Image: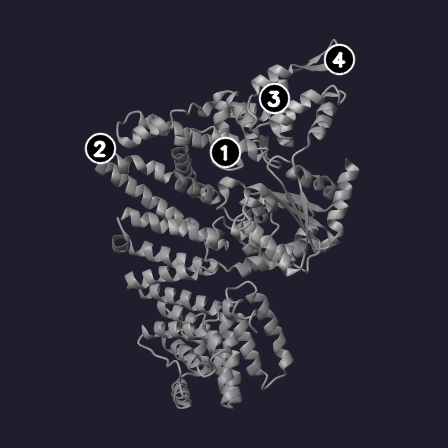
Amino acid sequence: ADEGNGELYDNAISIKKEMVLIYGSSGTGKTALAQTLNDRARKRNDYFISGKFTMGQRSIPYAAIVEALAELSEQITDRDEIFALRDKLGEEMSRVIARIVPALAQKDILSLTVFSDNEGRSPSPPRDQFNFAFRSFFRHLCERNNKTCILFIDDLQWADAASLELLEVLVTDQDNANLLIVGSYRDDEIEATDPLLARIREIERSNRVKISRLSITNLEQHVVNELVADTLNMSIDDTRQLSHLVHQKTHGNVFYVIKFMKSLAEDNLLQYNFGSLQWEFDLKTIDIKYVTNNVAGLMLNKLRNIPVEDAQVLSISSCMGSSFDKNILMLVVDFLQESLSLSRNQLDARSLSVQGALSFFKLQTSNVEACIDRDLSMGLLELVSNARYDSFRFPHDQIQEAAFALIPQQSRGLLQYFIGQALVSKLPANQLSKVLFSAVDLLNAGMDDYSAPIIQTPSSNSRVEREDLRREMHQLANLNLVAGKKAMGISAFRQAAVYLQTAIRYIEETNVGIDMAWVKQPGFCLNAHQAYAESLSCCGDFDDMHKSIDRIFQYTTSQEGRMNAYSTLVDAYGARDKFFEAFDTGFRALAEFGDKIVGNPGKGRVACEVVTTKRFMKKYTVDTVRGLPRMKDPSRAIMMKILVRLLIHASLERPTLFPLVVLRIVKWSCLYGICSSSPPGFAAYGYLLANILGDVESGYKYAILAMDLLEQNASKSEYCFTSMVASMTKANKMPLANGIKDNLVGYQVNALSDVIKYHATRY
């Protein structure tokens, strides 16, 4: 077996830039096959890391990748290797990675001066930033000592969109031949249009990587017979009838073959006779006892035959994902007991509903640890590796799915809701942040069942109940908003859009309609719609994005809110190369300040603007501009950001507008204060003076000023454009080669900024 594993490993790493896909039905041994690479990798001092997606946590961004990299944090122990990796990544990329994988920061593997668990709440960076950072991380990880890193991702059929995109970026990276990605998925549970298969086709069309496919099917009857004979140390003739029955009951599914054989021994239907020194069995009794031919039913029947509390530990845990923390489970059980106890003292519709839904619940908090121990001994749970005795997981999806199926159908929604409430109300903020997506998903899944009795069954207390329900729905709307923004903070825009849409729906239901929602909760509605529009834009759902922005323009009078909406529109038009619409939108935004730029200016109009601005700028020396205060009006600061976007578009598509936009940025900076968008404006002004109007000396001074302002204002987002334009202006007085350093720094900075799509990809 070891030789076979070695051959598989050697074949896997011999072909540079390969992706291996293992597919087949659940329980056929896909994971076990991939895990054979683990021991070989360790012997060769390579990395083998793995993560798993789960059905109940499909909306949690990067779940499997986070799990795999947390595992990696335990493997990187060489201090020289850590220091080399930190030095290569630097603070900016380290901070990006820490947003998704805090374990790497906590193990001091990333170069961070300060790290907080709330990193993900900071403003959302673009997906380019994440792609660049993670691609760099794996490159630097593998390049030292020429190590191979095998990243195994299990159950890709449940992967979120952001994870699929990141995996594509990693697997198609031509500069990292030492990263091998192995994935497994259930091919019988996805359609031809599934996002996973679409992403695989995209990878194939890129022609950058070879994809090797390995199909794993159920065992044929003669193979099951060989397995049974080998297990019982009997001849294949003596086990043929038994193996035929085993194959009939399990359809040759290797997971169920093993579980079925164990069940026979546990039920004393397969016994060892010490007199004859062989195993004995009664085929007729086995056939009668295990009447089902449904392989999933075998596991369900097994769980129904274990103690009730042991089974309920599994059922409650199954709602929280493929793994769980013992202390959190005990907190949840305690909360369920408390909720059930309180409901027994009430006769309102909701309390009666809770009593009915949770009537099956028998588990006591004091018994949880003993139940976990018994589940461990039965192989229904396993201890998470590298963890203290408080973190557990299901050994296989089928066990988790069977445990969830034990919950009565009519109880599932309410149970999920109360588990979510337990997490939200009982966990401290730092712990809740780590399970926020799971908690919100559980609450969303159960809200309809939770609210139905109050909405559908009027009672004497219905007014009080409805007020309580409105408060809880409002709380859930806020939680969805927080989850949506957190998802945006890690570039999981598809998931963010779902959370934000749910937040908007709940706030509208709470206030009985769209109009009243904007009247009673204008700040929330503006915040949610703006974030929703941004997430839709990043997903390419421009029709729905326009609907959300139209809602903002219809209902809000907040100038800052309207400017943010205009900014999103300009970015969306620019991303689709719709420059006429981008200029029109930007100029409409400018008009809200009583300012105006003509869309098709003649030469006379441009000349007049230039003369007027030069006369205006006589009041401001370069040193005066350096000492100007910061811009205080956030609405104008957003408008300046829009003008910089238009400046970039004009430099490429509408050169007649270039001077007008430049002059507007310069004048606004002098009149209203310096902001992060001022440096590119002054750099472009210097270019205009030196290269178009022939005033080389003045142009050079403004190019220097622009770079100084860039440093003073920590304006990394505009570094690339500013440094490029400034260096072209400075070339009138110094060799062009002297500007190469600034341009290289600009590229590196913008690789981790929100404008790389406007600069590095367009020039």
Label ID, residue 459: 2
Quadrant assignment, res 72: top right
Residue type at mark 3: give it.
Ser
Name above or below for residue 140 compared with residue 379. below
Label 1: how many Cα within 10 Å (few below 14, some 14–19, many 20+): many
Total tally of numbered discs in the picture: 4
Does residue 84 show up?
no
Judged by depth in the image, the label closer to the viewer, 1 or 3, is: 3
Q: Are marks 1 and 3 in contact (CB under 8 Å)?
A: no
Which quadrant is home to the C terminus?
A: bottom right
Q: Earlier in the sequence, mark 3 or mark 2?
A: 3
Residue at the (49%, 48%) spot, across then down: 117
Label 2: how many Cα within 10 Å (few below 14, some 14–19, many 20+): few
- How many angstroms separate mark 4 from mark 1 (CA)? 42 Å
Q: Are marks 4 and 1 in contact (CB under 8 Å)?
A: no
Looking at the picture, tell me which residue is in the foreground, 457 or 527: 457
Quadrant assignment, res 476: top left
In screen coordinates, is 633 left or right of 735?
Answer: left
Residue labelled with disc 4: 277
Q: Earlier in the sequence, mark 3 or mark 4?
A: 3
Q: Secondary structure at mark 3?
A: helix
Residue labelled with disc 1: 318
Residue type at mark 1: give it.
Ser
In screen coordinates, is 385 left or right of 548?
Answer: right
Residue type at mark 4: give it.
Leu
Q: Position of residue 365 (x, y in %)?
A: 45, 25
- How many angstroms separate mark 1 from mark 3 (CA)? 22 Å
Q: Position of residue 612 (x, y in %)?
A: 38, 88
Residue labelled with disc 3: 263
Q: Earlier in the sequence, mark 2 or mark 4?
A: 4
- How many angstroms separate mark 3 from mark 4 (CA)? 21 Å
